[in-house]
Image (cartoon, coloured by chain):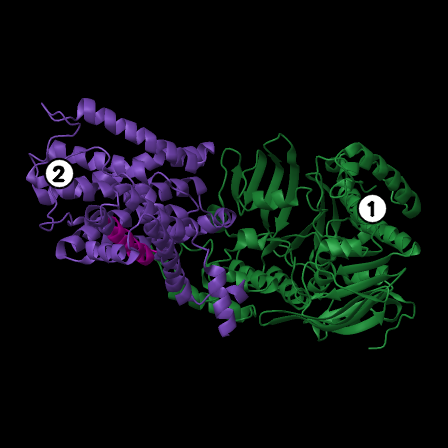
């Protein structure tokens, strides 16, 4: 492949290859990361982009191929080598000590001597320089726990720059940010490129690739399938390259046919063990035949709301009416009872809640319904019935591989999600609660899952979707509620919603 | 993960076998160090365990105890609970069945008394496990700590009862009066093997059916693998913790049936000594599956019986030495159970 960039690259990979047993994760990938530019690497889950960057960062060793930095061949055997070569990585999940200050976090692992004072003073000076050069202002004495998520990410970037990184790799950096914070992040990255830093952005959000990058590489099944100048491409083309076929990015759906109220929350509150109001007087109504989307930055009470609605956590105040049955603090409800009332729940964290990795898919397919016929007869499990039920679900929801006997953990994220969704939709629930419907799911499967949710709605199901992906909420929901600090900050009709106004609500502003 | 997986048969057969071989190698070194021919010792061990009808009987009698405590550990383990209290539960289970017999052996016939005594053993064992289970479920006290402490409580309680309350009139030893004939299980002449082994076999089948063929067992295993998923599925974790521990305690309590109804025919001190803890190793070695536990229990039974013969026949082999050998085997098949795995994986990876 002819490189498009003519300047000497900061990082060059030549025919890098990596296999895990029978899985060929990275196939002879050659690419160039230019200095003073933002390079995007996009691809579905399992396309090999994270593996590739782990090789660059020294977490894995390549089976073949060369890594060149500033034109010189290098061997990177560990993250220490990578740091020594000026490579820095900002992980999706922050690696900060919350009870330490920004400065203390910064010197962690680079203390510079047996006594802290000297290292801290040097770090303080360096931090001032970085803040000046890159516009990365932050209070060095603030406790990390007191910082917003966007600021914490800035600390992560500072940590990397503090160690002298000239090549900055960011893995899904916007997953926890509001649109405004994301824009700010991209401004910071742009400032870094002006100082000669090479930025690599790993993401699956095509909108961000279009907004932030100069060049984009597309990976599919371990191979590099395309290199494009961002200005010369569009989201539709990138999606097609990622999946290998045409993908519908927008979702066609009719106007909702709203029916009776299936679920009503009045003043629903939840106070946690420390006395913090995680949910603070939530009022909402969910009608048959509509999809209500709950948007918000992660950690503003969405998870807790979902758990209270599903009966997993008991509310500490307020009232919940589900299909005509009134439930409150004095008359709490458990998940089994919720299921009996016709509430199905696709949990946010499918690996932790929705399935047992070591169980066969056929056992996961009856989780929560194990004590009901036809899976249970005379207090004995009917395993053949579970097996054929699972095979049936797999066929209807296109779960691959079609192997009910395979341990659940061996399926990809998208296929696990399809199986759980199939399980929950199998009984034609009156209310369907869905948390993060497509987190870690491939684009192809996202399309399928979204269509299933819309179809459930059209059949009269009341659907509640909680998602950290604003695009997803915008695509699916008929009404959008935004949560901020445990309260509903505002409600927007889907037709009139746009990212700006939702972003403001997510950040705590009120709509005038 | 998948690339490192061993074939199922290697997982079930080869890995435990490799553990035993390693253990015997380590034992061999020690035996040589005390100046005994290891092959001679091995021969005596095997003959002692399996050489005659009587020795086989004793091996099976010991295996019965190990099966009960192994199953007890396994049931709790599948629920994600580590029951270290098999020792005390077995002890108190014995108290239960002993009290039932002492109270009723003059009025009830054996066919009625024995089932009552067995149920009493289960109830007392379960009750002794229920307290730590309750403390764990409602108070968050760690079950490992509380079950261990309950072993000591059980031990002290039994000494008190046997010295002050249950001691036979005019007896100098702290033990109860002998059971009437109605309270004695039929046993094999010349050995301690008795009908309890049938109960052990039934328990193996019962535990398997319960864990893998009932919705409740399914929910129990779900909790053990993933409490969040169990909660999501509508399982009451507190009640499930109680259920798992009570079943576990009941199984351990059956040691009392084998020991008191089958052998001693009276309540004695320390009849449960060692079986509760060995049950942990039995369960680990048997991979928490009833079939594996039965096999591991047979091995431990053979070691117990063969070891006793060994101590008897070779002057250099004291009783303590035999305990060291058993300890090493428990160490290799219990704590170090994963030790040979990388080597086996390498062998299989190369064969591919």
To which chain does the residue with label 2 belong?
A: B
Query: Outermost residue toward the bottom?
Result: A1
Above or below, A147 against A402 in this view is above
Q: In the image shown, does A208 or B1 lie closer to the viewer?
A: B1
Q: Which residue is mark 1?
A: A162
Q: Which residue is mark 2?
A: B265
Provide the residue span drawn in magenta.
B289-304
- Say whether residue A72 is left or right of residue A21: right
**Mark 2 residue element:** loop
Above or below, B59 against A490 in this view is below
To which chain does the residue with label 1 belong?
A: A
Colour of the chain lettered B: purple
Badge 1 vs badge 2, beta-carbon distance below 8 Å: no
Chain that appears green? A
Place of residue A505 in the rendered image (x, y in percent of width and height, measured from the top left)? 78, 44
The answer to if A219 sits in the magenta stretch is no
Q: In the image shown, does A461 or A505 lie closer to the viewer?
A: A505
- Say whether residue A84 is left or right of residue B102: right
Q: Which quadrant is the N terminus of chain B positioned in?
A: bottom right
- Say whether residue A113 is left or right of residue B306: right
């Amino acid at each position: 492949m002819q490189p498009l960039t003519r300047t000497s690259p900061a990082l060059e990979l030549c025919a890098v290859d990596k296999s895990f047993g029978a899985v060929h994760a990275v196939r002879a990938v050659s690419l160039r990361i230019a200095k003073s530019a933002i390079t995007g690497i996009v691809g579905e889950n399992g396309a090999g982009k994270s593996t590739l960057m782990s090789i660059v960062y020294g977490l894995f060793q390549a089976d073949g191929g060369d890594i060149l930095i500033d034109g010189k061949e290098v061997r990177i055997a560990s993250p220490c080598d990578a740091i020594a070569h000026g490579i820095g990585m900002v992980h999706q999940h922050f690696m900060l000590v919350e009870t330490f200050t920004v400065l203390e976090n910064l010197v962690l692992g680079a203390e510079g001597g047996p006594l802290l004072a000297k290292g801290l003073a040097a770090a303080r000076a360096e931090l001032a320089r970085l803040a000046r050069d890159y516009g990365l202002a932050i209070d060095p004495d603030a406790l990390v726990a007191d910082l917003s998520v966007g600021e914490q990410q800035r600390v992560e970037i500072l940590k990397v720059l503090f160690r002298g990184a000239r090549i900055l790799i960011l893995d899904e950096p916007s997953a926890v940010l509001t649109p405004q914070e994301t824009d700010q992040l991209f401004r910071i990255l742009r400032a870094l490129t002006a100082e000669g830093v090479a930025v690599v952005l790993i993401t699956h959000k095509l909108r961000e690739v279009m907004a932030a990058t100069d060049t984009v590489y597309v990976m599919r099944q371990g191979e590099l399938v395309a290199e494009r100048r961002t200005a010369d491409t569009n989201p539709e083309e990138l999606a097609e390259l990622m999946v290998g076929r045409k993908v519908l990015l927008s979702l066609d759906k009719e106007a909702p046919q709203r029916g009776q109220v299936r679920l009503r929350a009045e003043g629903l509150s939840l106070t946690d063990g420390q006395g913090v109001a995680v949910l603070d007087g939530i009022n909402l109504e969910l009608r048959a035949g509509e999809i209500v989307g709950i948007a918000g930055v992660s950690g503003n009470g969405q998870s807790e709301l979902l758990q209270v609605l599903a009966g997993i956590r008991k509310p500490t105040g307020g009232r919940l009416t589900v299909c005509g049955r009134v439930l409150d603090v004095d008359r709490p409800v458990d998940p089994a009872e919720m299921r009996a009332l016709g509430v199905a729940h696709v949990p946010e964290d499918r690996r932790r809640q929705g399935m047992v990795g070591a169980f066969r898919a056929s056992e996961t397919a009856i989780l929560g319904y194990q004590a009901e016929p036809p899976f249970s007869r005379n207090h004995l499990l009917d395993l053949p019935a579970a097996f054929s039920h699972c095979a049936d679900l797999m066929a209807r929801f296109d779960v691959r591989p079609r192997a009910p006997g395979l341990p659940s953990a061996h399926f990809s994220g998208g296929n696990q999600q399809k199986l759980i969704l199939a399980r929950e939709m199998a009984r034609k629930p009156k209310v369907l609660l869905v948390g993060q419907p497509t987190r870690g799911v491939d684009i192809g499967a996202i399309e399928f899952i979204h269509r299933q949710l819309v179809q459930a709605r059209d059949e009269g199901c009341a659907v509640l979707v909680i998602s950290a992906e604003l695009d997803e909420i915008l695509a699916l929901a008929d009404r959008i509620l935004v949560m901020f600090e445990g309260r509903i900050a505002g409600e927007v009709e889907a037709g009139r919603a746009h990212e700006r106004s939702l972003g403001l609500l997510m950040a705590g502003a009120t709509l005038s | 993960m998948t690339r490192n997986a061993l074939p199922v048969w290697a997982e079930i057969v080869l890995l435990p076998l490799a553990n035993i071989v390693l253990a015997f190698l380590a034992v061999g070194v020690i035996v040589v160090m005390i100046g005994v021919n290891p092959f001679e010792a091995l021969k005596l061990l095997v003959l002692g365990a399996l050489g005659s009808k009587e020795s086989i009987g004793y091996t099976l009698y010991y295996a019965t105890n190990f099966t009960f405590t192994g199953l007890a550990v396994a049931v709790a383990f599948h629920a994600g609970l580590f029951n270290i209290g098999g020792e005390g539960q077995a002890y108190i289970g014995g108290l239960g069945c002993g009290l039932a017999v002492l109270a009723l052996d003059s009025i009830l016939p054996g066919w009625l008394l024995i089932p009552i005594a067995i149920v009493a053993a289960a109830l007392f064992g379960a009750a002794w496990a229920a307290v730590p289970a309750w403390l764990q479920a409602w108070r968050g006290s760690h079950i490992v700590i509380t079950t261990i402490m309950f072993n000591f409580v059980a031990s002290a309680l039994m000494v008190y009862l046997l010295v002050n309350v249950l001691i036979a009139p005019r007896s100098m030893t702290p033990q109860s009066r002998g059971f009437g004939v109605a309270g004695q299980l039929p046993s094999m002449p010349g050995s301690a093997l008795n009908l309890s082994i049938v109960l052990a076999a039934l328990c193996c089948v019962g535990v398997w059916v319960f864990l893998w063929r009932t919705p409740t067992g399914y929910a129990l295993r779900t909790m053990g693998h993933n409490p969040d998923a169990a909660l999501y599925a509508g399982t009451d974790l507190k009640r499930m913790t109680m259920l798992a521990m009570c079943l576990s305690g009941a199984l351990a309590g059956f040691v009392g049936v084998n020991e008191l109804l089958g052998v001693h025919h009276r309540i004695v001190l320390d009849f449960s000594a060692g079986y509760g803890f060995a049950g942990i190793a039995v369960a680990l070695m048997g991979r928490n599956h009833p079939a594996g536990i039965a096999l591991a229990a047979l091995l431990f039974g053979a070691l117990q019986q063969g070891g006793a013969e060994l101590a008897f026949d070779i002057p250099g082999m004291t009783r303590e030495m035999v305990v060291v050998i058993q300890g090493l085997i428990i160490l290799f098949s219990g704590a170090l159970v994963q030790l040979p795995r990388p080597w086996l994986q390498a062998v299989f990876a190369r064969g591919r």
